[in-house]
């Protein structure tokens, strides 16, 4: 019916926003200004050599983690959509499959 069509449209718009905003966030962290994100994450200020050594690894970690932004947002929006449709089994199956893949990696 009409409500299902509205729900599908809303979910589609939400997933589109996830891709656009997640993509922009990923570009910002990975390409545009990773140093600003790193300063924010590390609290700015001094810290000397130890902080600099950590920053090298932290920047690499932040860039890799940023590549997960779009899938993470899609995952959260999809889970909410399934719960809204009163389907709790599908998110559970996805969570289990995701856990198995992470364990294998």
Image (spheres, rainbow, N blue to C red):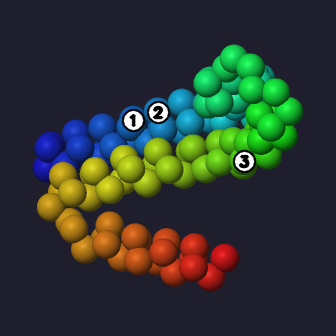
Residue drawn 67% across and 20% down? Answer: 44
Question: What residue is pinned by disc 3?
Answer: 61
87 lies left or right of 42? left
Query: On screen, 105 above or below 30?
Result: below
Q: Label 3's element?
A: helix
Q: Label 2's element?
A: helix
In which quadrant of the rendered view does residue 69 lie?
top right
The residue lying toward the viewer, choosing from 19 and 29, is: 29
Nearest to viewer (mark 3 / mark 1): 3
* Residue 64, horizontal then vertical, whole percent: 72, 49
Question: What residue is pinned by disc 1?
Answer: 13
Residue drawn 40% across and 70% down? Answer: 95
Q: Are marks 2 and 3 in contact (CB under 8 Å)?
A: no
> What is the C-alpha distance between the residues marked 3 and 1?
30 Å
The residue lying toward the viewer, choosing from 84 and 60, is: 60
> What is the C-alpha distance between the residues marked 1 and 2?
6 Å
> What is the C-alpha distance between the residues marked 2 and 3?
25 Å
* Residue 26, horizontal then vertical, whole percent: 66, 36
Question: What residue is pinned by disc 2?
Answer: 17
Nearest to viewer (mark 2 / mark 3): 3
53 lies left or right of 73? right
Label 2 environment density (alpha carbons within 10 Å; few <14, some 14–19, many ≥20): some
41 lies left or right of 91? right
């Amino acid at each position: 019916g009409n409500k299902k069509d509205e729900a599908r449209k809303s979910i589609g718009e939400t997933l589109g926003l996830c891709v656009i905003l997640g993509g922009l966030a990923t570009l910002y962290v990975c390409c545009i200004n990773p140093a600003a994100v790193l300063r924010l994450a590390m609290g700015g200020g001094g810290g000397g050599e130890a902080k600099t050594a950590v920053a090298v690894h932290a920047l690499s970690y932040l860039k890799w983690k940023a590549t997960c932004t779009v899938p993470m947002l899609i995952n959260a929006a999809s889970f909410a959509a399934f719960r809204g449709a009163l389907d709790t089994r599908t998110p559970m199956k996805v969570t289990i499959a995701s856990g198995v893949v992470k364990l294998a990696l």
